[in-house]
Image: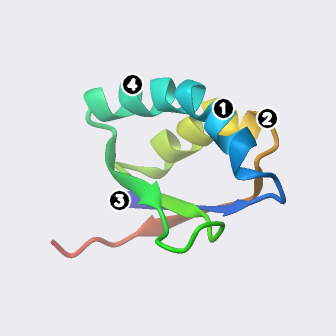
Amino acid sequence: MKAVVFYEHADAPMEKFMEVFPKHQVVEDEFIKAGKVLGTGAFAVPGEGAMAIFIDKAVAEEFVKRDPFVLEGLIAKVTIKEWNDEM
């Protein structure tokens, strides 16, 4: 079963996100190249957070544990939900 991760941003300036982004991108690229992430991105309204779709919950949890955005306190809340994809 696939899993969706929702990130809610902490109260941090965009400059801090951009400073950490290259480290986040390294982890994200690793998961994408391994075929473990199916889609990812920020919501259209700045500051509303982001989401990603992973192949399963264990992979989603692994990503969150390694994500510099989380590790550096830029994410206030992480929600992981298993998802019954019907496509």
Q: Which mark is residue 30?
A: 4
* Residue shown at the point (61%, 41%) measured from the top left: 64
* Mark 4: amino acid: Glu
* Residue shown at the point (78%, 52%) measured from the top left: 13
Q: Circles 1 and 2: CB distance less than 8 Å? A: yes
Q: Nearer the viewer, mark 1 or mark 2?
A: 1
First reached walking from the N terminus: tag 1 or tag 4: 1
Q: Helix, strand or loop at disc 3?
A: loop
Is residue 48 placed above or below 29 in the rendered structure? Answer: below
* Mark 3: amino acid: Met
First reached walking from the N terminus: tag 4 or tag 2: 4
* Residue shown at the point (54%, 27%) measured from the top left: 22
Q: Nearer the viewer, mark 1 or mark 4?
A: 1
Q: Circles 4 and 2: CB distance less than 8 Å? A: no
Foreground: 61 or 39? 39
* Mark 1: amino acid: Val
Distance from disc 1 to disc 3, alpha carbons, whole Å, reads 30 Å
Where is residue 19? Give x, y as percent.
67, 32
Where is residue 55? Give x, y as percent.
34, 48
Is residue 33 placed above or below 38 in the rendered structure? Answer: above
Residue pointed to by mark 2: 72
Instruction: Answer left or right for 1 relative to 11.
Output: left
Q: Circles 3 and 4: CB distance less than 8 Å? A: no
Residue pointed to by mark 1: 20
Residue pointed to by mark 3: 1
